[in-house]
């Protein structure tokens, strides 16, 4: 039991650092580190080291560099403060203390994405349905392919598949002997750790992530359903979710035509336009999927438009899918183009079975998602 349940003097960098009050802060930080995958991942990325006997921070009343670093990471990655504002100190009654202690209101935390960073703002837990939620943009490590490109791909730019796998691993994954770092539990897996595992164990080819092999490296197994998906696959997906297992979903969202571009006189890339000023497109692009999300078990929200809960690594947020193709703007456009043009190329667009709007409701110009492929996941031992 904690000696005291509040603090009266500052703890952290430049604080008074009373023994009992440091223990209170260390204990609260450990609770957040245990439940918030994003916070924990960045703590480790910035040099945080777990203590073998306690998991993360030693609750020893000593406010050393590890405790100060944990406070800084909490301010930066949970409170969304800038580096300049983050001071590594917890003041009595201050925003950092209130957030750590779980008593902060929405109105006092304007920059926090409540869907992506936590289930409840008060607890600052990046956890939905037990799954740790990751935003790929928070990780800058290079992936294990495309190293000869001018801009090698990173988790931030192309890590949606990896992040979706990792989110699944935090619930149904299992340690793989000789592959995982010592002492790492599935709930503590994070994209940058998984990326290194993939690099060290043939998880990548020259073309990208070896999907099913990589799933195995995270202690899971998967069945790939390339499509074209049909209504029968909805039943398969529902059955799989009902068993308590997640599904990785490959979605289309980009324009299915490829717009032609050129350099103007100033060297700026612009669209090629015809004599009427309309953008010129290349021939129809076969749709194979543009982005990965993780569909997770969970009861329907009661809203017909929110039947399947998913975690979107593009935004580090939850989203919903529905089965109504007529309500998907992108899908309606595809059907119209098919009806107006009988060329075989127009039949390459893959049918979707689920539809949804990406990301957090505060984002503008969100793309419509259309589920075109999927991987059903299970624990390797199942």
Image: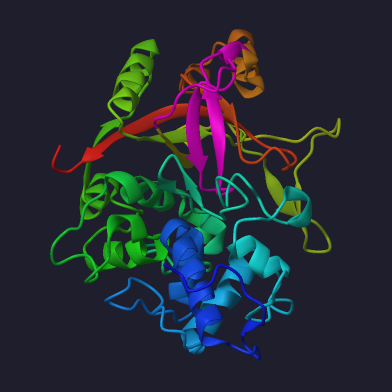
Q: Is the residue 365 above or below the residue 203 in the image?
A: above
Q: Is residue 11 left or right of residue 380?
A: right
Q: Does the magenta run of residues contain 319?
A: yes
Residue 253, visible in the rendered structure:
yes
Q: Is residue 304 left or right of residue 61?
A: right
Q: Is the residue 89 above or below the residue 368 in the image?
A: below
Q: Residue 269 in the image: state x and y as whole percent.
A: 74, 55
Rendered residue at 48%/25% (across/down) = 308
The quarter of the picture where the N terminus appears is bottom left
> Which of the 4 image quarters holds residue 368?
top right
The quarter of the picture where the C terminus appears is top left
Q: Is the residue 239 above or below the residue 15 in the image?
A: above
Q: Residue 242 in the image: state x and y as whole percent.
A: 32, 23
Looking at the picture, tell me which residue is in the foreground, 382 or 256: 382
Rendered residue at 51%/48% (across/down) = 313
Rendered residue at 54%/74% (across/down) = 25
Q: Does the magenta run of residues contain 55?
A: no
- The residue segment tinted magenta is 297-326
Q: Is residue 124 left or right of residue 52?
A: right
């Amino acid at each position: 039991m904690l000696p005291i349940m509040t603090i009266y003097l500052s703890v952290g960098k430049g604080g008074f650092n009373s023994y009992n009050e440091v223990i209170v802060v260390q204990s609260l930080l450990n609770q957040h580190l245990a439940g918030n995958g994003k916070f924990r991942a960045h703590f480790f990325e910035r040099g945080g080291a777990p203590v073998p006997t306690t998991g993360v921070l030693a609750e020893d009343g000593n406010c050393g560099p590890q405790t100060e670093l944990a406070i800084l990471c909490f301010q930066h990655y949970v409170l969304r403060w800038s580096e300049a504002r983050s001071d590594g100190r917890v003041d009595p009654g201050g925003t950092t203390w209130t957030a750590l202690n779980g008593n902060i209101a929405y109105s006092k935390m304007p920059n926090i994405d409540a869907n992506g960073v936590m289930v409840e703002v008060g607890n600052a837990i990046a956890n939905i349905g037990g799954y740790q939620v990751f935003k790929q943009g928070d990780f800058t490590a290079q992936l294990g392919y495309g190293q000869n490109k001018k801009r090698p791909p990173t988790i931030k730019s192309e890590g949606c598949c990896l992040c979706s796998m990792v989110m699944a691993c935090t619930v149904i994954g299992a340690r793989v002997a000789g592959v995982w770092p010592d002492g790492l539990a599935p709930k503590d897996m994070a994209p940058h750790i998984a990326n290194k595992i993939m690099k060290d164990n043939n998880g990548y080819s020259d073309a990208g992530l070896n999907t099913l092999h990589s799933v195995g490296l995270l202690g899971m197994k998967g069945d790939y359903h390339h499509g074209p998906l049909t209504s029968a696959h909805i039943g398969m997906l529902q059955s799989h979710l009902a068993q308590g297992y997640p599904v990785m979903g490959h979605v289309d969202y980009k324009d299915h035509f490829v717009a032609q571009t050129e350099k103007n006189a100033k060297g700026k890339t612009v669209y090629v336009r015809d004599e009427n000023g309309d953008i010129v497109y290349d021939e129809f692009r076969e749709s194979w999927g543009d982005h990965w999300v993780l569909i997770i078990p969970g009861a329907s929200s009661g809203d017909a438009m929110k039947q399947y809960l998913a975690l979107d690594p593009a935004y580090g947020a939850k989203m919903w899918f529905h089965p109504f193709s007529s309500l998907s703007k992108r899908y309606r456009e595809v059907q119209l183009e098919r009806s107006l043009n009988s060329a075989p190329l127009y039949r390459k667009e893959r049918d979707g079975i689920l539809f949804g709007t990406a990301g957090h409701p505060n984002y503008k110009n969100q793309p419509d998602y259309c589920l075109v492929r999927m991987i059903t996941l299970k624990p390797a031992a199942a």
